[in-house]
């Protein structure tokens, strides 16, 4: 829970929603992922609801494989706007909402990243955030001169140094370095310029950044560290963490562990906000909410469903969809018997068909599913919020923009009735609205 | 001259104008290079005047040195918005004007560049252009893990392959590849996907790009190739060339040479537009135009002036500014005696003081200077246009936004009176307004 007793809310708006069949829903613009108008429309709805921020996840290429054959051509995750250009376009067309996009530390250079986010922070008047990722897939590696992804430890070692370089570049100039005195002709005060001159294992970057300190001092840093190295990075430098948990206990364990790590870096528990993801299906009645869910579940193409099982169960496309789940065979890729057995146990215990199993696995890309009235969902959120499992939530509507309308119509009013969510923006920057301390210039 | 007899006009709007003292002018917002409002204001003026495009030059860092000491702190070229984020923000807030920004092939990866320009082309509805540069300075190299710039030949070899990869990525999908058929669940037609799978000397990039073909088919490619390798690259793949010439004969030579090279690539002369840069000081009378120029010349800080001489003459800060230019000494950096002698000859022949010499060298960053009434300047432009020296001009106003107002108030009406410039946009894309052929999908 936050110090002010208000939840932070983010809207995750990649693609067309967080349900695998979102694009087939009648209300969804199927070409929306390439339409700026679609994103602007959705972002403005989130801004009208006073959400803290919108967020774009990202991958540097198409990460899904065509297994089983034909599944990729049924997948909406094939074409989209690039998130930093999209963020800049939204910076110029929204006024108050925070703007967070993902950029990889494995396939970028710190100077570019420091410069682009600084620029978006200037354009937006202090609303930019960088979601730091290390890029896990071989598909992305193959777009950047490699055949496979970097090893986990190497990725995080590079990420650690990358973030340090970016932050040093953001602090190239003190806040008042640019005096721009027309009378004397002095443009900046040399004493307030600090050239990073970084020389490390992965990067040599002299600097300074050709940008002033930004309206936020530094853009907000977001992370989604679940692994040990990810948690270490988050504890050291993230302002916000997007987490993924499906039950209160594991969410609390994660929350406790991450907050506990902050002190070692001279940070206080409130300096890092933890926001688990949720996919809410909300309506006036439980039945209507369930109907919304069922409607989308029926729209999952069998090949998309089988693709969601492929990594764990191998190619099941030769079996009847409404028949039983077959025993694992040698057709399964890799060494994943335990996961497959796990899924198989679920299928056996509940007597699920292949279709029923993939509907369970494929639906919301692994993000926590909540179905019910606004009161039902607010109950769940409030329980996590009041019991040290969350400082807010990263809301991943199943479809867009209608899923955002449901937030505005149902969930946000309920949260406000409970005093859990703002009715106006408190500040002009993302950092201020999140309730984070101002970023004060310190020499690195 | 173009086939339709109309000039193409671009507005170069980096920093605060193309005069070294622009930021000190009373009308110029000294913090404008970090202000999106400033750029939007200026771009909208250019759009209202029906310019083909606005253009942002760029360097990946501060390229000037602090020679003589203290000169860098008088230089406005220290902090600015990043051009791709700026372009995306302008894409969302303008409606018709073309949007061109620079990106380096030496310090980027093709996948990022293909993706970002494609995204801006989608956001803008087909108005994006990429100015391809190879980055010559050591200062930029030092921001990207190197101590000095790549050798010239290596830069262009990499640039050649880089552009090919980008264009192959832009053609990953045929125009109608994304069928998005909600009823059948088919998102794209596999037969219309073409995975580049590029394996070259500098790059291995599998693709496909996670973006559809763009409204222009492909963004416009701009180049400023003056050297042999630059001309080869331009002839092979540029749609527009920004050139720099100070007299008709050399402009004609360049024009003839570049147009002549096109046939070898199956291209026609009209497939490449050549637009020399000009810095126009224009007013109702010649005297007023001259006064505008003189006012700015007086605002050149001596240290900025001496910095402009430093590379050729060494450090002259120990000499009286209004005294004679001293003979070259061993203090000059590097092996540049011939250039120094050249400048010295000019100074001697015209009996110039140090101040008078630097005022001549420092003023407009080497871009061709034109001072006069609209008729005077239109005469010059028309002469070049009608005599195979230019298809249009890249206009670099000395100060912004006032220099753009001068174009709208004086120069554009004069060009229109002569039938040399449009009164409305002909098409909806940059490519169409430039009169270039549509980019038709071809398998690479």
Image (cartoon, coloured by chain):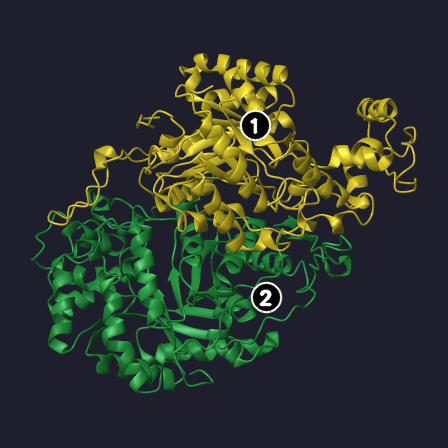
Chain colours: A green, B yellow
B264 or A366, nearer to the observer = B264
CB-based contact (under 8 Å), mark 2 and mark 1: no
Callout 1: 10 Å neighbours few (<14), some, many (20+)?
Answer: some
Q: Are marks 2 and 1 on the same chain?
A: no
Q: Residues within 10 Å of mark 2 (few under 14, many from 20)?
A: many
| Rendered residue at 61%/37% (across/down) | B283
Q: Which mark is residue A217?
A: 2
Is residue A26 shown above or below B57?
below
Name the quadrant of the C terminus of chain B: top left
Horizontal side, residue B144 vs residue A428: left or right: right
Above or below, comparing residue A240 to residue A89 in the picture: below
Q: Quadrant of residue B295?
A: top right
From the viewer's perspective, is residue B163 above or below residue A389?
Answer: above
Q: Look at mark 1 in the image and give the residue it sits on.
A: B375
Pointer 2 chain: A
Q: Residue at x 39, y 69 (%)?
A: A243
Tell me which corner region of the image, top left, top right, bottom left or bottom right, holds residue A404.
bottom left
Residue A191 position, x and y percent, is: 77, 60
Q: Position of residue B299 (x, y in %)?
A: 75, 46
Image disc number at residue B21? none
| Residue A131 shows in the view | yes
| Nearer to the camera, A180 or B25 | B25
- The Cα atoms of the two marked residues, 2 and 1, are separated by 49 Å
Position of A87 compared to B440: left or right?
A: right
Q: Residue at x 19, y 53 (%)?
A: A306
State whether residue A156 appears in this view.
no
Of labels 2 and 1, the one closer to you:
1
Vertically, is B260 above or below B215? above
Where is residue B175? Give x, y as percent.
26, 34
């Amino acid at each position: 829970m936050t110090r002010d007793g208000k939840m932070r809310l983010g809207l995750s708006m990649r693609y067309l929603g967080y349900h695998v069949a979102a694009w087939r829903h009648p209300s969804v613009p199927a070409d929306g992922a390439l339409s700026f108008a679609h994103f602007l429309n959705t972002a403005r709805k989130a801004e009208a609801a006073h959400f803290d921020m919108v967020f774009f996840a990202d991958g540097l290429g198409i990460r899904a494989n065509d297994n089983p054959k034909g599944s990729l051509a049924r997948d909406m995750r094939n074409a989209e706007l690039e998130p930093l250009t999209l963020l800049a376009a939204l910076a110029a067309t929204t006024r108050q909402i925070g703007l967070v996009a993902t950029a990889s530390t494995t396939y970028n250079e710190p100077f570019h990243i420091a410069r682009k986010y600084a620029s978006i922070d200037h354009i937006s008047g202090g609303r930019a955030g960088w979601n730091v990722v290390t890029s896990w897939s071989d598909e992305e590696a193959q777009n950047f001169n490699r055949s496979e992804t970097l090893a986990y430890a190497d990725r995080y070692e590079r990420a650690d140094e990358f973030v340090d370089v970016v932050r040093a570049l953001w602090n190239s100039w003190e806040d008042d370095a640019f005096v721009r005195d027309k009378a004397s002709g002095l443009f900046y005060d040399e004493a307030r310029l600090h050239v990073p001159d970084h020389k490390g294992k992965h990067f040599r970057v002299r600097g300074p950044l050709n940008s002033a300190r930004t309206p936020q001092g530094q853009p907000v840093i977001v992370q989604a560290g679940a692994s040990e190295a990810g948690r270490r990075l988050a504890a050291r430098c993230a302002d916000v963490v997007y987490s993924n948990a499906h039950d209160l206990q594991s969410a609390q364990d994660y929350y406790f562990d991450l907050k506990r790590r902050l002190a070692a870096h001279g940070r206080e528990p409130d300096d890092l906000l933890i926001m688990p993801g949720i996919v809410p299906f909300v309506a006036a009645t439980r039945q209507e909410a369930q109907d919304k869910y069922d409607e989308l579940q029926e729209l999952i193409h069998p090949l998309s469903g089988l693709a969601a099982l492929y990594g764990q169960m191998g190619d099941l496309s030769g079996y009847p969809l409404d028949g039983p789940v077959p025993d694992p065979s040698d057709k399964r890729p890799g060494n994943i018997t335990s996961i497959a057995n796990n899924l198989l146990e679920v299928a056996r215990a509940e007597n699920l068909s292949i279709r029923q199993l993939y509907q369970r696995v494929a639906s919301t890309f692994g993000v926590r599913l909540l179905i019910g009235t606004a009161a039902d969902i607010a109950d769940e959120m409030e329980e996590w919020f009041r019991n040290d499992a969350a400082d807010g939530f990263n809301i991943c509507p199943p479809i867009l923009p209608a899923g955002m309308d449901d937030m505005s119509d149902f969930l946000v009013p309920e949260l406000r009735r409970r005093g859990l969510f703002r009715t106006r923006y408190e500040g002009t920057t993302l950092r201020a609205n999140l309730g984070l301390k101002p970023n004060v210039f310190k020499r690195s």
